[in-house]
Amino acid sequence: MATARRRALALAAPPPDPFGEHRRAAWCERRQLLGAHFEFEADSRALLEIVRAAYGGLPAHRLKQRAPRLRVRLALGGRSSRVQAAGRVEPPPVRALSGAGILCGAVGAPSFVALSPQQRAALIVVGAEMLRCPYHLRYELLEFAVYVLAARSQGLMPLHAGCVGYRGAGVLLIGASGAGKSTLVLHGALAGLELLAEDSVLVRPADLRATGVASFLHLRRDALRFLDAASRRAVVRGARVIRRRSGVEKLEIDLRRAPYRLAAAPLEIRAVVFLSAARRSSRALLEPVTRAVALRRLAATQRYAAMQPGWQVFRKGVATLPAYQLYRGEHPREAAARLRALLIR
């Protein structure tokens, strides 16, 4: 009797490493991104390839002499439970998971991100089904973790904006969906401007230096009508079709190849440009905006950033910059030429 009880207690005892805290990652990758030093750990080569596809070949941006060290662990979460045994109504058992110093328990096989800005770490759990959706995995899990950690660890303003530059100077591009931001970024690149980011920019409030990730540009097919045949072939070479959750399909263009130029270092923001979908003649595309109007539009378009520490310092800095509204012309290269003129004057 006593022997049986001891055996039952032994069976109920937890294993020596239930969370896998002492299990070494099979794959590791180090990248200098967004002013920070990231250490990526992955359970599988497939997960590491997602990291490489997102961040391989990018310039190493630094905002401080000593970049913060951030850790991101990507762990496979298994497959979802589809069939329950006859008569069972309880959910699947809890599965213990860990990574980058973060512990969690998951029921079933979900995909999720757990963040600890204080520990400068993130755990990304990827269900087997999510591996079939690399675009969503990259943007909704991986980049979410990377941008939040980089912003929180360095006190950066997370802006929904694009940014292009020239010789260290940059212009913020702010516009609602459909305003033509991606098309303008493409034509700015074709005009020789440096690319910092398509739609997510991190800015240091104290000196308005900006960093971003310029891996991909997402463009509607109908935007290709503005390109000549040779340029169109160059743009679509190697591009993939992705589908947003809204159902909109776009071309995903890799910007880490010729003829595009990525910003080699963070850019100093020199102007703010608000994009309008309205059309005007080529002579009246760029219109100055008063400081009061610019600050109102900034707050209205950057509601998440406005809730972050450092917003008032950032806002004060932006108030010293020239601001403009940029309208559409007959061709996007006209608007790109206005941006270039702003940067090289």
Image: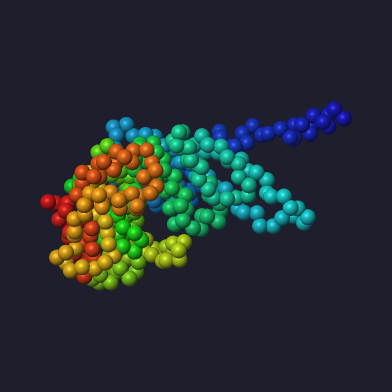
Question: Is 122 on the left-hand or right-hand side of 223?
Answer: right
Name the foreground residue: 179 vs 64. Answer: 179
Does residue 72 appear in the picture of this structure? yes
Q: Is residue 28 above or below residue 301?
A: above
Q: Quadrant for residue 39, please give it.
A: top left
Q: Is residue 265 above or below residue 177?
A: above
Describe the colour scheme in one phrase.
rainbow
Q: Residue at x 14, y 65 (%)?
A: 283
Residue furthest out toward the top: 2
Which residue appears at 71% of the width and 55% of the height? 84
| 102 lies above or below 158 | above
x, y percent for residue 273: 24, 54
Give the image location of residue 57, x and y in percent.
32, 49
Instruction: Indicate the position of residue 157 as horizontal and vertical percent values.
Output: 34, 43
Question: What residue occupies the far right of the structure in this picture?
Answer: 1
Residue 63 on image: x %, y %: 29, 37
Residue displayed at 51% across by 55% down: 131
Name of the residue lying farthest toward the front:
292
Name the quadrant of the N terminus. Answer: top right
Tell me if I can see residue 31 in this picture.
Answer: no
**Residue at 35 percent of width and 66 percent of height:** 220
* Lateral position of residue 52 relative to residue 211, left or right: right
Q: Residue furthest left?
A: 345
342 relative position to 72: left or right: left
Answer above or below: position of 11 versus 319.
above
298 vs 49, nearest the viewer: 298
Residue 220 versus residue 175: which sits nearer the camera?
A: 175
The number of discs equals: 0
Q: Quadrant of residue 335?
A: bottom left
